[in-house]
Amino acid sequence: MSAIETGIVPVLEVQCKDCGATITMPAHRFAANCPYCASPSVVDRPVDKGGHRKDQPDFILGFDVTREEATRRVEGWISRSRLFAPSAIKQAKVTGIQGIYLPAWLYGAVARSSYHASIGENYTTTETYTTTDSKGNTQIRTRTVTKTEYRKLTGNHSAYVLDIVVTASCGLGNEELETIEPFDLRAMRRYDAAVVSGWSAEEATLSRDEGFRIGRDEATDKVAAKLKAFMPGDSSTLVDFDTSFSEENTDLVLLPIYVFAARWGDDQTLRILVNGQTGEVQGEVPRSMAKILISVLLALGVIAMIALLIAGASAL
Ligand SMILES: [Zn+2]
């Protein structure tokens, strides 16, 4: 292992051969298993022959939740009842805990858009219609109907799009990170190696350019949603819009998370995440096919019973 001296805490740089995450960890915390995928194939980080500089973090969000508190929350989460989960999940045992700083790109910009929309305004009107009464006489009646009038609308809209988080981690994807978001980014500080000292930190795998591109794509989606919400009228269709971004920023931030590995049932594993700032716990719980089948059968039974009762009642 390549031990590097940074300040007082000696650190190791390792790489997981399975998920590809490159992690810097304090030597005394060295874990032979990857914190993300629990793979035992953690090897000494290969020397970067190209000599290219890695992206350095710009900001860091510190841990507010202690290891003990995170463990307590995870135990509470495990013991929670779930409708379609296998019952054995409630007896899951935590086999590993790792506090890790996860790298993510933070994209922000000013978005100026011009748009074309079709706005629908509802109005009510009274119309007459003819009907036949029980004696066969034709009658003229009136009723109130709602109609929609459409008009074209073009305009400009400006908005700040802030705090779009794009994971730069190799071990944890955006969808999974989103389950423990949001982070309160107002507590962010300038990156300082001293804050990371004693903790594991993953190196950014996604480059700044890629983080920028994905961040801008997400910002475009957000702008579309904002424009739709902004439209007047009873109904509206955003026909098309064109957005230009300025004052764009892409900063690398380290986010505090705990990754728990747990074992349940017949040697099955479970990964549970804890937001190291807010304590939010999430994990993907498998569904029990047996439980789902039983409830489907029960529902079918109830429907069959109601059908029989109705049939019986109409036969009387
Ligand atoms: Zn891994």
Image (cartoon, rainbow, N blue to C red):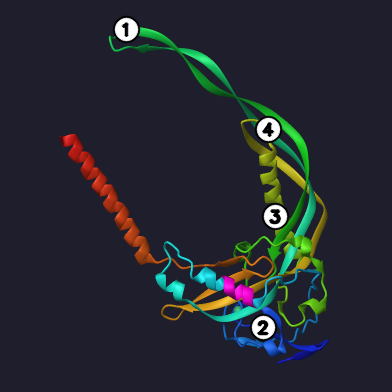
Residue 132 place in picture, x, y as percent: 33, 12
Tell me the SS state at disc 4. Answer: loop
Query: In 3D space, how far apart are the residues under numbered discs 1 and 2 (Cα atoms)?
Result: 87 Å
Q: Which residues are magenta?
A: 68-73
Q: Which residue is mark 3?
A: 217
**Which numbered disc, 4 or 2, marks the residue closer to the eye?**
4
Residue at the image position 37 percent from the left and 8 percent from the top: 139
Residue placed farthest to the left in the image?
316
Residue 29 place in picture, x, y as percent: 68, 87
Q: Is residue 71 above or below residue 8?
A: above
Marks 4,3: beta carbons within 8 A: no
Q: Which residue is mark 4?
A: 232
Tell me the SS state at disc 2. Answer: strand
Query: In 3D space, how far apart are the residues under numbered discs 4 and 2 (Cα atoms)?
Result: 53 Å
Q: Earlier in the sequence, mark 4 or mark 2?
A: 2
For residue 137, the mark is: 1
Q: Is residue 104 magenta?
A: no
Residue at the image position 20 percent from the left and 40 percent from the top: 311
151, 128: nearer the viewer: 128
Q: Is residue 274 above or below residue 305?
A: below
Characterize the local packing of mark 4: few (<14), some (14-19) or many (20 or more) Cα atoms within 10 angstroms.
some
Tell me the SS state at disc 3. Answer: helix
**Which numbered disc, 4 or 3, marks the residue closer to the eye?**
4
Q: Earlier in the sequence, mark 4 or mark 1?
A: 1
Query: In 3D space, how far apart are the residues under numbered discs 3 and 2 (Cα atoms)?
Result: 30 Å
**Mark 2 within 8 Å of ligand 1, using the beta carbon:** no
Residue 63 place in picture, x, y as percent: 72, 72
Residue at the image position 67 percent from the left and 40 percent from the top: 229
For residue 15, the mark is: 2
**Which numbered disc, 3 or 1, marks the residue closer to the eye?**
1
Characterize the local packing of mark 2: few (<14), some (14-19) or many (20 or more) Cα atoms within 10 angstroms.
many
